[in-house]
Every structure is written in structure tokens, then in C-alpha cells.
């Protein structure tokens, strides 16, 4: 995906899921995109959403992915020990603390020289994760596994996290409809239960830290682990609790639906009232209860979930559109 840089400070901007506006994470400038950029992002998102409709046919998937990766950009990082790391990425996202590259098999985090302690924080948070014993196997697949760490010649630190080829940042899909947002909320509730179990507040849960696999309808929380804090920690003048994870979950779903804030969510033909109310409302006090609340909202919004096989598409899961 092509990057736009801020006219004010030159930093790479983040494109809103609507494809109509861009925001600079550094100086907070907001831009309305011009016609050609808007068309570009709409086409890009359309292409990404096309992945939802692809069959389980491995060849077909690979061909589509190869086509996508043809446009990957390349950056070479020089290590302190003289090695060179060639990163081909589909997308780069940058905030004040890290530049994040989406490569084919990894997510690469580059911490500036002054921010290298964050690479250690990231590692420590990830290695502290514990899973409820009953679902150890499945849940740990959706959290980072660190595949490498490097010190660069310029003093920066590089951290590589494994990802499956078919996982992409949620932001790359642009705006999605209610039924897609619904399965994403279900997966995020799962992830929030793990955070709850570990008494952690993930202050960066959002469309840049969550990666989805559009074929398998899974979501992984790969980004922002250097910003994770313990439950009841004061951060930037506010005490963070695990309920903040559930607020982030709602903000993420609102963003996926094309709203810039959850307060602006409105029910529509494609967003049932109970779902809209859930996104605007107050979360339960913990993720387990919130998941139960969501299950109820899901049934009220789309009816009983049907038994599904792995290759069932979204329409079959939730009934006819
Ligand atoms: Zn700027």
C-alpha cells in the first residue's frame, strides 16, 4: 500500500478506513485526501476484501497473495555486526515509539535509538503471557512469538514477530460491514479474556495492532506490547484498568465500521441496533462477562449462530444477507 507523508512534518500518515482522510500520528494534522488518493485506497481496500471471498484453494490464495506482494516496498537495515536485513513490506505504520513493517512472514518493529528500552519491554510483556490451561494451544497462536532481535548500526533496535502469510493488519481492509465487524468482535473478546487472565491493559489495541486472517476468520494481537501495563497502573495521568481493553475493543469495531469514534456509531441497514448499542455502551467490568454480553448481543443482532464447517463463508454463518 502506498504511503502518504505529512505536508507539515514529513512523517508517514495513517489512512482512515473510510479512505477519505489521513491523520499524522506526530503532529496530529488531519488531511482530506484528494480524488486520486481516495480512488487508490478504495481500490486497495476492495482488493483486500476480495480475500474474504477466496476459497480454501491454496493455489488460488497464493496467486492472489503473490500479486499483492509484487507491490511490496523494500528497506535494508544494517546491523551493528555488519549483517544486512532486507525487509520487504506491504505496509508500514509509524507512531512516536516504533515503526512497524508488515512483511510476509513477520511483523518487524523498529525502535529508534532513544526508544530501544521499548524493545525489551515488548519482549518482557510477551514472555510474561500465561494462558488458561484449558485452551493453551489455540489461544497462544494469536499472540506474538518473537523470531529475532537485532541491534542496528544507527543504534536502533529491530524486533521480529512471527505471523502467518495470510494475516494482515486490520487497517488494510478499510471499512467493513456489520457481519464482518461481528466476527472480529468475537475474536477480540477472546483476546481480551487472555489480557484479563493476565491482568494486563493493552493500551494500543486497535486497527494497527490487530492482524486478521480473512480466510480463517481469526484475529491476532501482534502490535503495541511495549505499551502494555498491569491492571490499575497510572499512565499519562489516568489509571488504566482491564476495562480499558473492552473500550478499545469497541473503538476498534467502530473504526472498522467507518466511524471515527464509538460515540458516533449509528444503527443502519447493515448495523443492527443491539450491535450499535453494544459499541456505544459501557463494557462489563471484566472480559469474561463482556464476552457473555456480546454473545447475547450477537444473537439479538443476527439470530442464532449456525453450526459451521471451516470453509463456511460469512453469509452461511449468519444466515442470508
Ligand atoms: Zn505531521
Image (cartoon, rainbow, N blue to C red):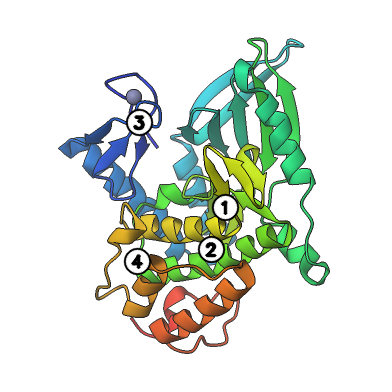
Q: Position of residue 243 (x, y in %)?
A: 56, 60
Is residue 155 visible in the rendered structure shown here?
yes
Q: Secondary structure at mark 3?
A: loop
Q: CA distance from mark 1 to mark 4?
A: 20 Å
Looking at marks 1 and 4 on the same chain, the residue that comes earlier in the sequence is marked by 1
Looking at marks 2 and 3 on the same chain, the residue that comes earlier in the sequence is marked by 3
Q: CA distance from mark 2 to mark 3?
A: 31 Å
Position of the C terminus, as image quadrant, is: bottom left
Q: Which residue is mark 3?
A: 24
Taking the spot 46% from the left edge, 49% from the top edge, the residue there is: 207
Q: CA distance from mark 1 to mark 3?
A: 28 Å
Is residue 203 visible in the rendered structure shown here?
no
Check contact, mark 2 vs mark 1: CB within 8 A.
yes
Q: Secondary structure at mark 1?
A: loop
How crowded pointer 3 is (Cα within 10 Å; few <14, some 14-19, many 20+) is rated as: many
Taking the spot 37% from the left edge, 59% from the top edge, the residue there is: 254
Is residue 128 rendered to the left or right of residue 70? right
Q: CA distance from mark 2 to mark 1?
A: 8 Å
Looking at marks 2 and 4 on the same chain, the residue that comes earlier in the sequence is marked by 4
Looking at marks 4 and 3 on the same chain, the residue that comes earlier in the sequence is marked by 3
Above or below 136: residue 168: above
Check contact, mark 2 vs mark 3: CB within 8 A.
no
Above or below 69: residue 248: below
Taking the spot 60% from the left edge, 75% from the top edge, the residue there is: 289
Ligand 1 lies in quarter: top left
Marker disc for residue 215: 2
Confirm or reject: label 3 Cβ below 8 Å from ligand 1.
Answer: yes
Marker disc for residue 166: 1
Above or below 279: residue 31: above
**Front position among marks 1 and 3:** 3
Q: Which residue is mark 4?
A: 177
Q: Position of residue 187 (x, y in %)?
A: 57, 66
Amino acid at each position: 500500500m502506498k504511503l502518504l507523508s505529512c505536508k507539515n512534518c514529513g512523517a508517514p500518515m495513517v489512512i482512515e478506513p473510510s479512505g477519505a482522510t489521513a491523520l499524522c500520528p506526530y503532529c496530529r494534522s488531519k488531511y482530506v485526501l484528494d480524488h486520486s488518493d481516495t480512488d487508490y485506497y478504495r481500490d486497495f481496500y476492495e482488493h483486500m476484501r476480495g480475500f474474504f471471498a477466496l476459497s480454501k484453494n491454496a493455489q488460488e490464495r497464493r496467486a492472489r497473495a503473490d500479486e499483492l506482494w509484487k507491490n511490496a516496498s523494500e528497506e535494508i537495515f544494517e546491523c551493528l555486526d555488519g549483517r544486512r536485513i532486507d525487509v520487504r513490506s506491504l505496509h508500514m505504520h509509524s507512531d512516536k515509539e516504533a515503526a512497524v513493517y508488515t512483511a510476509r512472514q513477520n511483523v518487524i518493529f523498529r525502535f529508534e535509538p532513544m526508544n530501544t528500552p521499548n524493545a525489551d519491554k515488548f519482549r518482557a510483556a510477551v514472555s510474561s503471557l500465561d494462558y488458561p490451561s484449558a485452551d493453551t494451544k489455540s489461544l497462544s497462536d494469536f499472540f506474538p512469538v518473537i523470531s529475532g532481535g537485532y541491534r542496528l548500526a544507527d543504534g536502533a533496535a529491530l524486533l521480529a514477530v512471527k505471523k502467518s502469510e495470510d494475516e494482515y493488519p486490520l487497517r488494510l481492509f478499510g471499512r467493513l460491514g456489520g457481519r464482518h465487524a461481528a466476527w472480529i468482535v468475537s475474536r477480540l473478546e477472546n483476546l481480551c479474556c487472555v489480557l484479563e487472565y493476565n491482568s494486563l491493559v493493552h493500551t494500543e489495541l486497535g486497527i494497527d495492532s490487530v492482524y486478521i486472517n480473512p480466510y480463517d476468520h481469526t484475529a491476532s494481537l501482534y502490535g503495541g506490547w511495549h505499551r502494555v501495563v498491569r491492571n490499575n497502573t497510572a499512565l499519562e495521568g489516568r489509571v488504566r484498568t482491564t476495562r480499558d481493553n473492552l473500550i478499545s475493543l469497541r473503538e476498534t469495531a467502530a473504526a472498522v465500521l467507518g466511524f471515527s469514534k464509538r460515540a458516533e456509531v449509528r444503527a443502519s441497514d447493515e448495523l443492527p441496533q443491539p450491535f450499535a448499542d453494544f459499541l456505544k455502551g459501557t463494557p462489563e467490568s471484566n472480559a469474561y462477562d463482556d464476552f457473555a454480553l456480546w454473545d447475547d448481543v450477537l444473537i439479538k443482532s443476527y439470530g442464532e449462530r449456525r453450526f459451521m464447517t471451516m470453509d463456511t463463508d460469512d453469509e452461511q454463518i449468519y444466515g442470508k444477507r
